[in-house]
Amino acid sequence: MEKNKWFQKSVVYQIYPRSFMDSNGDGIGDLNGITTRLDYLAELGVDVIWLSPIYKSPNDDNGYDISDYQNIMNEFGSMEDFDKLLDAAHSRGLKIVMDLVVNHTSDEHAWFVESKSSKNNPKRDWYIWRDAPKDGGVPTEAISCFSGTVWEWDEVTKQYYLHIFSKKQPDLNWDNPEVRKTVFDLMDWWCAKGIDGFRMDVISMISKAPEYYLPLSEGGCYNPTNGPHVHEYIQEMNREVLSRYDLMTVGETPGVTVEEAKKYAGADGKELNMVFQFELTDLDCNETGKWNTNRAHLTDIKRVLSKWQHGLYGTAWNSLFWDNHDQPRCVSRFGNDSTPQLREASAKMLAVCLHMLQGTPYIYQGEELGMTNYPFTALSECRDIEALNAYREYVEEKKCFTHDEMIKNIRKASRDNARTPMQWDDTINGGFSVGDPWIPVNPNYTEINASAQVSDPNSVFSFYKALIRLRHEMPIITDGEYTLLDPESEEHFCYTRQNKDTKLIILCNFSDKVIECPYTKEIEGGELVICNYEAPNSEKAPMRAYEARVYKI
Ligand code: GLC
Ligand code: CA
């Protein structure tokens, strides 16, 4: 593949190291654990592994609060273990993309410790400090992504510092050139080690608009994304680091619009390869954010995905995902996990629907097994700071929900749903750990696990494997133009892909009912490329619950 273009043909697998595989029985996944499971990923056929953060961290936000960017978290192992993992991955043809979390650091990072030590410290300006307003209160009304104000008071130097996430995640001041230079240097250090790219955490937030620092009464705003210098800083990063290596880069960009994405992920290669947009996963949000039991409408899902397919076609590049470590499990959320049959069918159907689109697909660990949400019944089963803070806010402070209602919301929306351990086999703790796992294992591991699926040709795993192979074999999946059919249907999601040689028709029944096959004329005489059930007797055969078919015309 041409330098810097392999990302368009790749399928990425996301590993959340804490929950993937524990090699030493302390109940926490680790690097050596990942190394022992590389053959599984090679068997699946993915091209790239994205590792959620493995750097030193006090784990206020499970590694997204970094206290040393050039060392490995104690619980995960050593730099030697990392080097072994990287070599072992490369020897299997697997690339490794690191999570780069540089909008903020941990408050335990040496830079912040210095910054905090006095107003005259040379690193004071590396973070964002503000005086208390004369009439008291916090500098602005901006709200943290993890509940409450973004401002934390420092008693020693008598100023507030800004933290968009937890108070243990102070935001770096990217307007300071020394900060940028230091970040670029540490990125360069990792690149020189031979890593294959970066997934950039909330990179759309590194430049805040001046209004962000004003009280609402003075024209302030809540929005920390897509600020005035963000593209300038990413272009600088590209010039200084990215362009000098053969990397894959993906920006996590909350608040991104199609227009902004064309800049972040433009085909001109000045910034990043692609971005994650959250319009799809935000569809079920309301005034209490994700904390509700809503389900997105299929027509909205189609509208959003289609907008991005058209919007970036030929000018930028999409990343495709149903879930990740911040989202509930996709089969529970967009499919149906109420019976084993429906779960399997809907997991496969969702995979077809996503993997036939244009963009780079991301598989979140366990998705390829159809792993489900966790049946939370108590707050003591939750680990995530976001859910724990939200519980305090919505149940204890604002009294928006009763305890039972909030547990239901958590069951539907909590990030912990994605973070329960990977289900390897039906032995204790799903084969994840012989110790006591840091977070409960989903009790359905006896039924849903890798060992049962790898050798079963009809499993969700084997189906993902087939889809990945198709992407590698059929150029149209990478380059074909997308057209949505019937935007109004709440039952099926059908679309076509077309290039100069061929056309694909993708039919997905999103309902638990048997439906008439739509587009029988269009698929007549076509070749069935893949189907998540036994092949239908004829093209006209009705579509079974959650059936998905792809025809080549
Ligand atoms: C991103 C990460 C999320 C983390 C947050 C703060 O959204 O994906 O897990 O909590 O940034 O770093
Ligand atoms: Ca361990």
Image (cartoon, grey):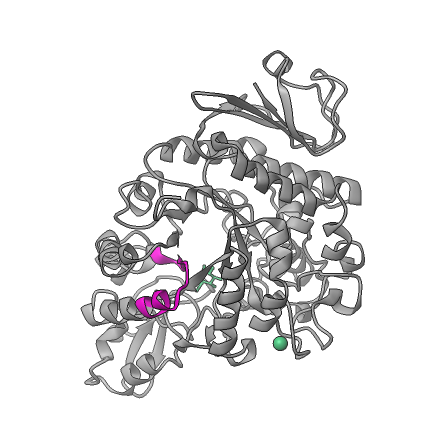
Q: Can residue 252 be spotted in the picture?
A: no
> In the picture, which quadrant includes the C terminus?
top right
Judged left or right of residue 171, residue 167 is: right
List x then y, in percent, for residue 346: 69, 39
Check the image and name the residue furthest to the front. 91
List x then y, in percent, for residue 253: 38, 52
Residue drawn at x 51%, y 75% is: 59
List x then y, in percent, for residue 99: 44, 63
List x then y, in percent, for residue 345: 72, 38
Magenta region:
187-203
Judged left or right of residue 370, residue 102 is: left
Q: Can residue 77 be spotted in the picture?
A: yes
Vertical placement of residue 100 versus 508, above or below? below
Residue drawn at x 45%, y 40% is: 359
Out of 270 and 208, give the one closest to the viewer: 270
Q: How many circles with numbers are drawn on the protein?
A: 0
Classify residue 116 by image quadrant.
bottom left
Residue drawn at x 62%, y 65% is: 20
Judged left or right of residue 155, residue 485 is: right
Residue 197 in the magenta stretch? The answer is yes
Vertical placement of residue 185 versus 410, above or below? below
Classify residue 122 by image quadrant.
bottom left
Residue 77 in the magenta stretch? The answer is no
Residue drawn at x 30%, y 42% is: 266
Vertical placement of residue 51 versus 435, above or below? above
Out of 217 and 180, give the one closest to the viewer: 180
